[in-house]
């Protein structure tokens, strides 16, 4: 039986409290008096991890540059929370991932994934009144990582080898993971079923703590494939050799009614999505997580470098 020890837990009095605490002080961003979105009032949200916040800040700045008045509600805890905020109208726009859309939002399994996942998610979610804009040129999927020296010492290069190693060495089968990964079908439960093994112990941590605790509190850890802390903490990402993890292409999501009212949003975000490659987003993430820069500063500098701000 897998044992789970909880180090951090989110408690909240509801979605309204989370929204009230989220973002960079909850400040409004004033748009210019002209531009294609002049007069629009839009609330930008994001999930709580660095990449999502950076994408949220990029979006907020782009919309402000087009004339919108933007309210910052980035940093909401959990996929379900931010999606609920979008559906309820508490926020108007945020970036999500096709794998999350397919499994967690639309309720499919990891075994019936279509070849063109983006199109399938966009088409089906349109029935819920949600639009998915053009995806970016990167995906950020779940992976399991371990310290590079530990991987080399034990001949670990992929998840099959990890499963065999843990089965043979249960005293070294501790994994650090965040609450969402622990409970998602496309996360820990599905991973263990797909590779027919079980971690000896699961240590629940805030996602941001995992990267430094691999090799300390646990031998293995949940990571995101575009997270620059993989390199800075000398981790080796194990290949998902059985192809369990679903594709997580990043895309802007918003209500269909918002897009109908402001169709210019699609045109504003298209060149941004085109310019966001895996190398680019990993670098932006690293500037926040490794270099200590503020997400909004990183977002603004990158947009300016790309010539996407007036």
Image: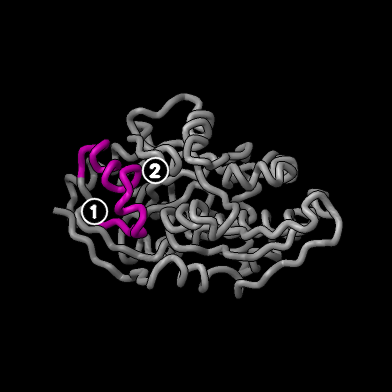
- 250 left or right of 192? right
Residue 213 higher or lower than 38, as above or below: below
* Label 2: which secondary element: loop
- Mark number, residue 173: 1
**Residue at 36% in and 59% down:** 178
Residue 265 higher or lower than 310, as above or below: above
- Whether residue 13 is visible, yes or no, is yes
Residue 135 higher or lower than 78, as above or below: above
Q: Which of the two discs, 2 and 1, labels the residue nearer the N terminus?
A: 1
Q: Position of residue 292 (x, y in %)?
A: 61, 69
- 253 left or right of 201? right
For the record, the magenta segment spans 173-197
**Residue at 48% in and 29% down:** 120
Residue on which the image places disc 2 = 238
Q: Residues within 10 Å of mark 1 (few under 14, many from 20)?
A: many
* Label 1: which secondary element: loop
């Amino acid at each position: 039986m897998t044992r789970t020890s909880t180090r951090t837990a989110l408690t909240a009095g509801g979605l309204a409290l989370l929204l009230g605490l989220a973002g960079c002080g909850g400040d409004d961003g004033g748009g210019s008096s002209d531009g294609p979105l002049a007069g629009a009032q839009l609330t930008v949200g994001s999930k709580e991890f660095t990449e999502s916040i950076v994408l949220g800040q990029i979006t907020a700045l782009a919309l402000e540059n087009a004339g919108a008045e933007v309210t910052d509600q980035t940093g909401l805890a959990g996929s379900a929370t931010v999606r609920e905020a979008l559906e309820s109208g508490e926020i108007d726009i945020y970036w999500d991932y096709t794998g999350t859309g397919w499994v967690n939002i639309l309720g499919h399994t990891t075994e019936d994934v279509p070849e063109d996942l983006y199109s399938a998610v966009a088409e089906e979610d349109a029935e819920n009144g949600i639009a998915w804009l053009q995806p970016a040129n990167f995906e950020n999927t779940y992976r399991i990582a371990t310290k590079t020296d530990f991987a080399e010492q034990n001949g670990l290069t992929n998840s099959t080898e990890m499963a065999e190693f843990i089965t043979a060495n249960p005293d070294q089968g501790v994994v650090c993971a965040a609450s969402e990964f622990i409970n998602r079908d496309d996360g820990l439960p599905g991973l263990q079923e797909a590779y027919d093994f079980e971690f000896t112990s699961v240590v629940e941590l805030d996602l941001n703590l995992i990267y430094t605790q691999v090799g300390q509190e646990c031998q293995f850890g949940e990571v995101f494939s575009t997270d620059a802390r993989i390199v800075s903490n000398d981790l080796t990402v194990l290949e998902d050799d059985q192809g369990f993890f679903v594709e997580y292409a990043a895309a802007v999501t918003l209500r269909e009614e918002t897009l109908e009212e402001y169709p210019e949003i699609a045109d504003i975000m298209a060149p941004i999505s085109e310019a966001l490659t895996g190398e680019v987003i990993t670098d932006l993430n690293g500037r926040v997580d490794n270099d200590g820069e503020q997400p909004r500063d990183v977002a603004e500098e990158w947009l300016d470098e790309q010539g996407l701000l007036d």
